[in-house]
Amino acid sequence: MTSIKKYCLLLSFLSLWGCQINNIDTTINDDNSNRKTLDLKDIEIAAPYTTIEQHEDAFYVLYHLLSNDYYNSKILSIDLIADILAGDVYKGGAVAYDWSEAFEFQKHTINNYNSTLKSIWNKNYDGIRVANALLSNFNDDLFPENLQQEKEYYKAEARALRAHFYFELARFFERPPIIPAGKFEGYNYKQPSEEELYSFIASELFEVSDQMRKHQDDFGRLGKYSVLAELVKVYVFYSGVYSRENLTLKDGSTLNRNQVINIIEEIIQQSGASLSPNFGELFQSLLGKNNFNQEVLFEIVHEKRLHLNWSEYAIGNVKSLVTGPRGYFHSDSFINNGWGFGIPTRKLYDSFDNSDKRLNSTIITAKTLIDSLNISNTYPMDNSFNHTGLFNYKYTTHKTNDGSNKNIGTSGMHYDQNYHYIRLADIYLIGAELYLAEGNQAKATEYVNIVRQRAGLYSKSTVTFDDIVEERYHELAIEGHRYFDLMRWGSNFLNEITVSNYTLYESQHHDSKYFSNGKNLTGDIGVEADFETTFYAPSRGFMPIPQDIIDQSDNLVQNPGY
């Protein structure tokens, strides 16, 4: 297929594309027929592309990389990793050494050779590598008159995705090197200052926003307001972490708080997005349209496939599988068995107001799951490491409307629940935060109350910064934002990650159906020390650059504290 329009229609499958560091594999059918393999050298050539298909190959690999959560044989759900770092969820799994790198995240004892971190680094730089190749080798002369607009979309989306990959790297590794356009030749480049790095990221997003289609479409291609929403996130992270109100762009102009408020207002008033009236339907297909919900500004698309099992070509939502309850097999269950990672903390659960409608759509209890089966004297599930009797209910092993996710075994890594990377509620709450900093308490209060009203909570007469912090905690729980919020709010907030002298929660429910192997599944199971952590203050929240990447470069400097 050489028609861009035909490729656009196929973007909904996203399974067309798979990428490894050394090659790219494309699969049209689930049975692996019609497979096409590309070496990265086919994308990363030193001369302009000679066919439109070469542009298409690079373009769709970019979107594959955006959705790939299983990379270099590592679980790579950035939102799950961030929530473990934040102390909102425990690593979980079977035992302490099950995904041991994640236990380092939980305990904040992170090793320079942590292989999950290396995969985060590699995945995002592979995205940058492909974007650079596409932009450097773009051949305008190949595109006929009727595809001129599509050609410009390609360029803008490649720049936006490249900026996104750099932002992911910046939030984890602080100052990743900016790789010059052209052939990728490793990491032997000097690290930019934070001003240079964020200037590049923000400028790319700002410049391309008007060159894109208005909305992200149901195939997953980004739109103007996807990009502007991420620009808002970039600004508040930079301005918070580095205590700077102004972010200087490449053209010498500055992005300040008032300008970002104006961008937020444009998103609210002109994007067409609106809060979903039912919070639960954002995450549960049985309640409505969870994928491409009206509230979502930046959606990362996942798909379900049953035949490839564990492979580098998986682009399903791996988090859905790994956070489902362990050993939960029953034909009457409304969610499927999972691996028991990402176990919510009692602190998070207990922090919700009982009248908050978001609670039961965010966390589901072992008691609820067991009670729903109407059984007794059986082993309804297995306990996890760091078991609390609580499970993530936003991104989990949800069954679909047609029951097609029912008992699909290990292939369930291909759950097709999309990740809502940026929702309008997030933008409302950032807007409230910025308005409050500007002294406009009325507008800050209005925006917080819009979010609270959907949650069934009373409206506040005035809001404080602490109110906004609490609202973000509950609205965006288990969505991967909390850790980066703590980083931008500073050391006092990061120190809240520290948990000392933990007391195991003892359940008050003692019916035999709640027990497995003599352990009460509705309470804490484990030893106190495994629930405790001490935030590593010298890191300021950043991760170490993978040591073998440092060893390959004459210029990279390890981050402070490692």
Image: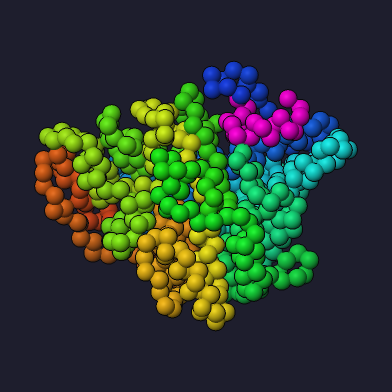
Whether residue 103 is visible:
no
Quarter assignment of residue 326: top left
Q: Nearer the viewer, residue 104 or 260?
A: 260
Find residue 409 and report its horizontal and vertical position in percent: 37, 27
Vertical side of 84 occupied by 538: above or below: below
Vertical side of 386 occupied by 415: above or below: above
Is 201 situated left or right of 369 in this image? Answer: right
Whether residue 306 is visible:
yes
Vertical side of 88 occupied by 64: above or below: above
Farthest residue toward the bottom? 439
Q: Residue at x 37, y 56 (%)?
A: 358
Is 232 situated left or right of 78 in this image? Answer: right
Q: Residue at x 51, y 43 (%)?
A: 291
- The stretch drawn in magenta includes residue 11: yes
Q: Nearer the viewer, residue 407 or 85?
A: 407
Find residue 126 and report its horizontal and vertical position in percent: 63, 42
Q: Nearer the viewer, residue 483 or 359?
A: 359
Q: Which residues are magenta?
A: 1-27
